[in-house]
Amino acid sequence: MTAEVVVYGASGNTGKLVCWKLAERGIPFIAAGRNKQRLEEQMAKVPELEGADYECVAVEHTEEALGELLKGKKVMCNMVGPFMQLGEPVVRACLENNVHYIDTTGEQDFMRFVEAEYGQAFKEKDLMLAPATSMMWASGAIAAEIALETPGIDTVDILYSPSSTPSVASTMSFLRMCCQPQFLLENNELVEWPSATAYSVQIPGMHRARTALPWSGGGEPIWYATDDRIRNCTVMTAFNNDRVMEWAMKLIKEFDEKYKDAPREEQERVTNEWGNQISVGEPERENEDIHRTVVSCYARGKTQAVSVILWGTCGYIQTGSIQAITTQALLEGKAKEFGFVNPARAIGARQFVNELSEEGLHCEMDKINNFRHF
């Protein structure tokens, strides 16, 4: 079968998981990256790819080379970050070749950039432009969309609690995004979070308070900034590991003190350097008994309130599945919206919940209506 899907950055941790989940659905794909030998070696490490229909292809990271690769394709799954540094040529190549674009970014500034520069052009071509088609930040949007089924809801407060060890690419990406301006949505306006500030939160299912950070601000405030249904949206992240949060705050404060006013090129150099120093290699595949996740959405309107909690496991594997679910829907022509759009709205929040539950990555969702009229 001819492959209509490209997984770019397939040799990385998340890329391999996306390939696994595509193969699980019987979707042929091209595993693309800079080095064909490395691609072949990494694909061979994924037992689920034995007998799968895929091809390893080396490609230069230029718009022209990517454009050649994308001719005749339908979906690009991009894992190559940091995305603000490396993502634009991929987006441009997709637009030029009429290819849907989805990625795994956590970088709020990249999301704002591609929406402003390319969102309308993708919409005019009935193409999906969906950065952050991943556990972070699609899961919060899934919970928010389910909350929005309750009439009158206009405010969502979202909290992520992952517990996996960050991959190399994730470390590079989150270091830069936590050191850039981070935004929440307040009364229909994007407002910057205070810099280098942590918050105490209560994760559902836990009695101990945890430390949380905006962690780039999340994708949800950017998606909902132009959505008439939502006027307020905040997103925070609290890892179960206190040492991770302490370490992150230390670096964020150092950046705020030394580099906040430095030229953008210097800021990018510093966060890349930190990422290279910290990352010691790709983590082992997640363990479903250990690497559990919680995504909580507290939503309300004037007199309405609802809570949606997604109990899950293995956040990176969830990302692989979210990418594959979205890809399959695009190939089958089932997307409901195009342009810059959150995948939960374009594909359907309950579609994601149902499929992730069938895979054992989510349990049944908790949805609690919290309002009474007096």
Image (cartoon, grey):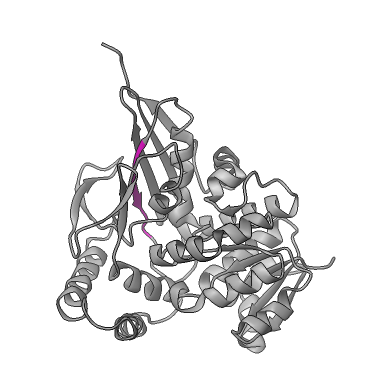
Q: Is residue 141 magenta?
A: no
**Quadrant, the C terminus:** top left
How many marks are shown on the rendered structure?
0
Up/down of 156 relative to 293, above or below = above
Residue drawn at point x = 31 percent, y = 22 percent: 303
In which quarter of the view is residue 302 placed? top left
Percent x, y of residue 312: 45, 47
Residue drawn at point x = 83 percent, y = 68 percent: 2
Residue 34 or residue 161, whichever sits in front: 34
Residue drawn at point x = 38 percent, y = 67 percent: 165
Residue 259 or residue 25, whichever sits in front: 259
Q: Residue furthest right?
A: 1
Percent x, y of residue 43: 65, 76
In which quarter of the view is residue 46 placed? bottom right
In which quarter of the view is residue 311 placed? top left
Task: Classify residue 138 as left or right of residue 211.
Answer: right
**Quadrant, the N terminus:** bottom right
Q: Is residue 162 magenta?
A: yes
Up/down of 160 relative to 97, above or below = above
Percent x, y of residue 264: 32, 81
Q: Residue furthest left?
A: 257
Residue drawn at point x = 20 percent, y = 67 percent: 249
Residue 355 or residue 347, whichever sits in front: 347
Q: Is residue 371 visible?
A: yes
The segment highlighted magenta reads 155-163
Q: Residue furthest top?
A: 374
User: Mostly what secondary structure, the magenta segment?
Assistant: strand
Q: Is residue 314 visible?
A: no
Percent x, y of residue 98: 71, 65
Task: Classify residue 341 as left or right of residue 308.
Answer: right
